[in-house]
Amino acid sequence: MYPDRVVSGMRPTGAMHLGHYHGALKNWVRLQSEHPCLFFVADWHALTTHYDDPSIIESSTWDMVIDWLAAGIDPSQATIFIQSKVPEHAELHLLLSMSTPLGWLERVPTYKDQQEKLADRDLATYGFLGYPLLQAADVLIYRASMVPVGEDQVPHVEMMREIARRFNHLYGREKNFEEKAREAVKKLGSKRAKLYNELRTEYQEQGKDDALEQAKALLDDAQNLSMSDRERLFGYLEGSRKLILVEPQALLTEASRLPGLDGQKMSKSYGNTIALRDDTETVTKKVRTMPTDPARVRRTDAGDPEKCPVWQFHTVYSDTATKHWVVKGCKSASIGCLECKQPIVDAILKEQEPMRERAQQYLDDPSLVRAIVADGCDQARKHAQETMRDVREEMGLSYN
Ligand code: TRP
Ligand code: SF4
């Protein structure tokens, strides 16, 4: 019914590291050439946990956006924006909050987890409980069909689907729905109308999913329908409600196989990261001082790659031949650890080269970044306003 939009956000964590790149950004870069994508800085989300220290949000945002651009997010393909610059997200959040059962929010696994993890903060707040609902508004407001997220966020996407379904159930109800839907079918023109009815019957009576898909494609192509007729006809395929909000799917991004320098998860708080824009010397030094299999005390001691964080880097960066060379050389002590690390240094530097180059132009002229984001905010706002017009109308708030 709507373009197969992809929406995802990240909290403004400042400069990105290679864990972010291999865990999420690389995937975004691929998606932007396949679908219309909206990527945003979730600055309000940062406030749900760090409301007492908002001072770094702004600089973290710019650093992060520069790294998105450096990683290859292309503003001519994807829309890049800042959540709080599209206040419609907050309006939808508020409206959705009216009908969201508290239990749905309390049951989200990250709610208790995060409260325990961030025990030094008082997270017994209204905003923190509402976090997943704000996230639902972030996605539903673009009627997105796909949300690339890590595994921990999948329950949030599940909840978004329930929120959308409940919304459509509550507000997609319409007096004389059947009649209006049948009128709308006629507007498709006789040939299309006939096909629509056949496909609808096939789906409803025989449960044929491909009939449903075909009917949706038919509606996608029907240019002359008004927005409400379109919503009716989509809803009519499956039941007796208009589909105002779309249920999105989680696109599970495989967890990054790239651990930190010490083999733990790569994270700024562990001090084990390689930043996207670390310079050559820093990268070289960081890799050369990485811990290795503790059994290799002397150069002549054999080691086991399975017990070495450097090996994890080889699985991400090296080809088969190099990996064979590592395994053989390590187990027979025929190569030294520094030797073993060199291909990693080379591969990371090669990966970073275009990123550093792209970043440089934005560092030299920050107004470029401001302009890209301003433009992205305008585009996002346009889409968000369209949805809100429908939402207000269905909720009896249009005051025409
Ligand atoms: N909650 C996400 C995180 O912490 C960030 C986020 C906010 C998000 N809104 C979103 C992700 C909407 C996907 C879609 O990583
Ligand atoms: Fe690790 Fe390579 Fe040294 Fe083996 S040779 S311990 S894999 S760094």
Image (cartoon, rainbow, N blue to C red):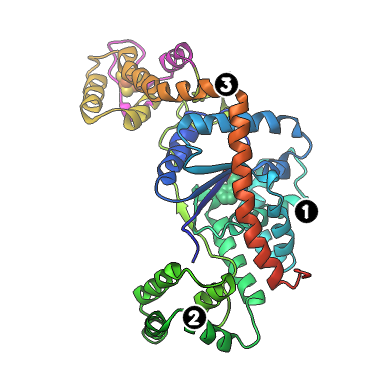
Q: Is tag 1's residue or tag 3's residue first in the polypeptide sequence?
A: 1
Residue 220, percent from left and from top: 44, 67
Q: Which residues are magenta?
A: 279-308
Under mark 3, the amino acid is Leu
Q: Residue at x 37, y 72 (%)?
A: 214
Q: Which residue is mark 1?
A: 126
- Ligand 2 - quadrant of the structure image: top left
Can you tell which of label 1 and label 3 is closer to the viewer?
3
Disc 3 crowd, CA 10 A, few/some/many (<14, 14-19, 20+): few
Closer to the camera: disc 2 or disc 1? 2
Sort mark 2 into few (<14), some (14-19) or many (20+) by Cα contacts within 10 Å. some
The answer as to whether callout 2 falls within 8 Å of ligand 1 is no
Evaluate if marks 2 and 1 touch, with contact meaning CB atoms under 8 Å apart.
no
Q: Earlier in the sequence, mark 2 or mark 1?
A: 1
Magenta stretch: includes residue 310? no
Tell me if 399 is positioned left or right of 192 in this view.
right
The dominant secondary structure in magenta is: loop
Looking at the picture, tell me which residue is in the foreground, 84 or 229: 229
Tell me the quarter of the image containing the C terminus.
Answer: bottom right
The circle on residue 377 is: none
SS for dot 2: loop
In the image: residue 6, left or right of residue 210: right
